[in-house]
Image: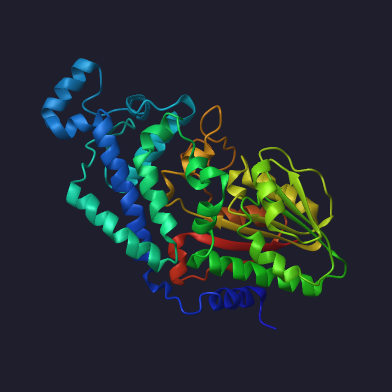
Amino acid sequence: MPPLNDRADTAGQAALAGADPSAAAGAVHDLDRLILLGLAADLHRRTRLERGTRLGRGAAREADAIAGDHGGAHEADAIAGDLRAAPRHRWIAGHWLAALHEAGLVSRNAAGRYHDLHAPRRAELAAARTRVEAARLALGYPAELSELMLRSLRLLPSLLRDEVGVQALLYPDGEPATAEAVYRGNLISRYLNAAAAEVLTDLAERAVRPLRILELGAGIGATTADLLPVLTGRPVEFYLFTDLSPFFLDTARRRFDAGFLRYALLDIAHDLPRRPGELDLVVAATMAHNAPHAGRLLGQVAASLAPGGRVLLIETVREHPQSLTTMPFALSTQDGPPRRLDGRAGSTRTYLCREEWLSALEGSGLRIEVDLPRPGDPLTALSQRLLVATR
């Protein structure tokens, strides 16, 4: 029998039948570019960074000297003040500026202050908006994605001031339809979820007892929906669907009807309940990065696994600018930025890279069995991966 990594990849590729992912890299670039230009335009319009473009560098430096600024360069917190960001969202301005700097759209001096922001022209913004439709189609996203991106750009002032919550964009009228459309059905989700289902199939066929499964941060159940059919007609003791929010638990209760499903509130910002050697599978789809210390979380997961048990991660391994107008707002705590105690501490990074996840899994005493997509696969441009490790 081929290795599990090969079988999971084959299942993922089969789920893409009729789709051509060869244009993925260009499409991702176009989605990212729209948000980057939209952010640059917003900061140019509403902050002191505009002054350097409008007055010219020499005049701007004179004006800034009078105002107490440093040679036309400004700290991120000053920009947050210009934007009238709510206290818990002030860190987001720095996060945006770091991304704009990486994209070459704003300069940063040795002291970490920003200057010379690119001022997008109307034609440049219009061209970026036009390319988004082709890009989202190439990646298999529905129209809701471009609508979400454009609406989030329009609502940036209200989002930053905490007058509108990002949940209102993702779950209008309290319904998950927009989030469901965005997070399921696209090329990378189809590939990863089909590959994950193959991993579960393999586990179920090897099982010597009814399966005990825990899903962390299951959210709208985008991955759950593709895993549950694998379990139909198989012995399952329980599938524990957990999330931080009662909203997602209530939605899942209405959506899924498998008799073995159980539901519980669980916050991975705190230690997991002790289940030594109890579980056959722990699923964490696009959520393990929310843990303050990813390695500590994986250590607790590993301790909960029975011999031969697996952890199945679906993770973003690089932040793409296309999420900058939504994801940071979801990550803000009442005290500000998310708490990071691992290798991300002291940085603006949201995600761990692939190598960090592999190291954390192996450091927890687990053996890597699946690491997909393969090198060279066009889907790698989307920076989402399936990682499976066994105790």
Q: Is residue 166 above or below residue 52?
A: below
Q: Is residue 114 above or below residue 201?
A: above
Q: Is residue 315 left or right of residue 55?
A: right
Q: Position of residue 104 (x, y in %)?
A: 27, 47
Q: Position of residue 211 (x, y in %)?
A: 82, 63
Quadrant in which the C terminus is drawn: bottom right
Depth check, front residue: 308 or 41: 41
Q: Specify the farthest residue to the front.
A: 173
Residue sitting at x 69%, y 53%:
254
Q: Quadrant of the N terminus?
A: bottom right
Q: Give the quadrant of residue 47.
A: top left
State which quadrant residue 205 falls in: bottom right
Residue drawn at 46 percent across, 39 percent down = 348
Task: Give the camera-side residue of 342 and 349.
Answer: 349
Foreground pick, 158 / 321: 158
Residue beneath the point at 62% across and 60% down:
223
User: Residue pushed farthest bottom?
Assistant: 1
Is residue 253 visible to the viewer in this orientation of the structure? yes
Residue 199 appears at what percent x and percent y? 68, 70
